[in-house]
């Protein structure tokens, strides 16, 4: 908790006590190789590593990620995990590319190709009653303790067909919150296609791609999508609703009639 000062438009001031959202460097290591350092909220880090591996395509199934260990250091956090399956090839390729980024001009082309890589089609799914979206929105804040304390965290929730919230994960980063949610669902053996994902984030193409790779079929976001997010959702046939509010939601790409 920190003592600070609130200043109003008329110039009046008053002391207030605030709690800041936790943020720290989190290093993700797979098979002893450093893959990425993310700025994240250091909570639910096992879920984070598992979900990150799944949404980044390093792991095809939850069983491909094992032996997750979390360690706190003076500089931040390290999460180590064992990776099996075809993701090992992608892991070593990522390490090779990262080393080459400082010495060649080809990596930009490689990265552009990676962004344009086709997404798999999501599973066929039935229409969702939009009333479920409003039910989930009405209940979401009660499931956001970090947001209530700090006012500065993103949340990703998994909701059933009726809009009941089953799982929620929070983080300072919108992608991290979704990765944590995916990891939690994988650990619990839950099928992301059995309901829908609700994210407080702006709907970027990364949010769409992570949802698709996790096996979700429906995504709802509180903010608007980017043009590329819409294109990627259409390509993968992901049902997408955005600008979700208490009194309205934008059907960007609903299920086919």
Image: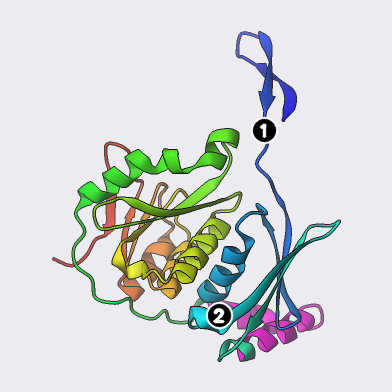
Sort mark 1 into few (<14), some (14-19) or many (20+) by Cα contacts within 10 Å.
Answer: few
Note whether residue 69 is visible. yes
Relative horizontal placement of residue 79, taking residue 89 as reference (left or right)? right
* Residue 219 occupies quadrant: bottom left
Residue appearing at x 30%, y 67% in the figure: 194
Q: Position of residue 95 (x, y in %)?
A: 73, 83
Question: Dot 2 lies on which element?
Answer: helix
Residue 95 is one of the magenta-drawn residues: yes
Q: Position of residue 57 (x, y in %)?
A: 53, 79
Disc 1 versus disc 2: distance between alpha carbons? 39 Å
Disc 2 designates what residue? 114
Residue behind mark 1: 19
* Residue 60 image position (x, y, % from top left): 49, 83
Residue situated furthest right in the rendering: 74
Which residues are the magenta region? Answer: 89-114
Callouts 1 and 2 close, C-beta under 8 Å: no
Q: Is residue 162 left or right of residue 243?
A: left
Q: Residue furthest left?
A: 257
């Amino acid at each position: 908790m920190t003592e600070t000062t609130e200043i109003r438009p008329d110039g009046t001031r008053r002391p207030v006590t605030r709690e800041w959202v936790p943020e720290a460097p989190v290093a993700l290591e797979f098979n002893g190789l450093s893959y990425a350092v993310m700025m994240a909220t250091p909570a639910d880090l096992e879920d984070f590593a598992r979900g990150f591996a799944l949404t980044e395509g390093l792991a095809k199934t939850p069983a491909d990620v094992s032996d997750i260990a979390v360690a706190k250091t003076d500089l931040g956090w390290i999460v180590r995990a064992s990776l099996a399956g075809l993701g090992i090839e992608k892991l070593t390729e990522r390490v090779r590319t990262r080393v080459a980024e400082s010495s060649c001009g080809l990596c930009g082309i490689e990265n552009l190709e990676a962004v344009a890589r086709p997404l798999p089609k999501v599973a066929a799914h039935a229409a969702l009653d939009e009333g479920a979206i409003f039910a989930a929105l009405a209940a979401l804040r009660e499931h956001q303790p970090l947001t209530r304390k700090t006012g500065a965290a993103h949340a990703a929730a998994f909701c059933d067909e009726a809009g009941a919230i089953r799982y929620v994960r929070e983080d300072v980063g919108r992608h991290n919150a979704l990765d944590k949610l995916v990891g939690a669902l994988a650990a619990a053996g839950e099928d992301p296609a059995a309901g829908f994902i609700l994210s407080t984030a702006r709907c970027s193409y990364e949010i769409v791609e992570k949802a698709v790779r996790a096996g979700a079929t429906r995504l709802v976001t509180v903010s608007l999508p980017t043009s590329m997010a819409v294109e990627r959702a259409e390509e993968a046939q992901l049902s997408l609703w955005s600008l979700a509010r208490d009194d309205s939601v934008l059907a960007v790409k609903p299920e086919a009639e």
